[in-house]
Amino acid sequence: MSLGLGVAAHSFGYLGGFNGAGTGRACPSPIDVYRLMDLAATSGLSGVEVPEEYIRGMGEGELARVRGYAEERGLYFVLDSGVVDVAAIRSLIRGAKALGARTVRVTASSILCGDRSAVAGRWPNYIAEIVERLRSVRGAAEEAGVSIAVENHQDLTSEEMADLCEAVGSENVGATLDSVNSLAVAEDPMEYARRLGPLIKNVHLKDYRIYSTPQGYRLVRCAIGEGVLDVGALFSLLREIAPRATVAIELAALEARHVRFLEEGYWSGYPPRRIERVLPVLRTRESRSRPAGEEWRTPWELGAGPEELAAYEMTQFEDSVAFLRRSGEALKRI
């Protein structure tokens, strides 16, 4: 049985070559685009989300070979980039056409943990600049039939994401919904998705365990189904509001995210919000936090070696696929 889902290379911070890059802790033989496709195919998945680095420098001939390799295995592509950069997006749109990808994922910022304190006074102007950059590439995206999907990278509230997409003014610009990143901006994952609705073009399916702290909570990666996300409810909602969205397993970063939303300074970068909007997050913290004293650090944070890191990432990926099969979420989506 084939799962109508893909896998994002960023599920593998260590094996993918991202964590420790350029240091002695880097993976000595990181996954490349061919190995990622093999992993997807042997796991019964239907696609791959490939970062810009995996195809950088490829000519037309090599891109054609990559596309052929994917087509032989029945795989689709989503291309992945970082903070909105006009030149990078134009290049990825060309890559998307060559690979037959219909979506390019980008981020609005590199902010993590919802912490805007360093840019609080400049945030509105910064987002206005991101809108202008996206407007400058919307024509190229429309001509190529490619969607640009901005991720909620622990930075944007649901209203801000919707306003950003609508301000760009193109059907080819929408959102990549990271299923649990909304917790970093103190929003409930299901409510966040519901507010975006049909703007959702792409989905990162991941899960977090929550560890309470006096300042808020830590979000720690885990296999899908082992954290706070109601996967069944999310899939049901997506079938209703965004039935054509691509969906990829994207396990979280190897570093825990400390969201200090109970500190006054955290809110300095946000517009006022009614307490009713935050109550679901407070209830989740209260009811779903892991036991006090439980180790929250990942093997990467504990200084583990290559074999342990590789086993940790692969086990979480395999457990995620197994959970999705057992839970009946293997619906053909593409």
Image (spheres, rainbow, N blue to C red):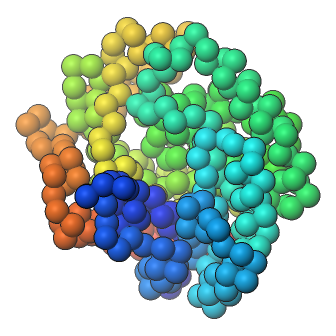
| Image: 329 above or below 119 | below
| Image: 37 above or below 176 | below
| Image: 285 above or below 300 | above
The answer to whether residue 96 is visible is: yes
Indicate the position of residue 107 as horizontal and vertical percent values. 60, 42
Residue at 85% in and 40% down:
136
Instruction: Using the image as rendered, state which of residue 212 and residue 164 is in the foreground.
Output: 164
Residue at 16% in and 62% down:
305
Instruction: Using the image as rendered, state which of residue 150 and residue 301 is in the foreground.
Output: 301
Residue at 31% in and 70% down:
28
**Among all residues in the image, which is located at the extreme left?**
293
| Image: 55 above or below 288 | below
Instruction: Using the image as rendered, state which of residue 175 and residue 61 is in the foreground.
Output: 61
User: Left of 205 or right of it: where is 294?
Assistant: left
Indicate the position of residue 190 as horizontal and vertical percent values. 52, 40
User: Left of 179 or right of it: where is 83?
Assistant: right
The answer to whether residue 164 is visible is: no
User: Left of 109 or right of it: where is 188?
Assistant: left
Indicate the position of residue 17 as horizontal and vertical percent values. 40, 63
Indicate the position of residue 281 as horizontal and vertical percent values. 39, 28
User: Left of 258 or right of it: where is 51?
Assistant: right
Instruction: Using the image as rendered, state which of residue 6 and residue 254 is in the foreground.
Output: 254
Q: Quadrant of residue 65?
A: bottom right
**Among all residues in the image, which is located at the extreme bottom?**
72
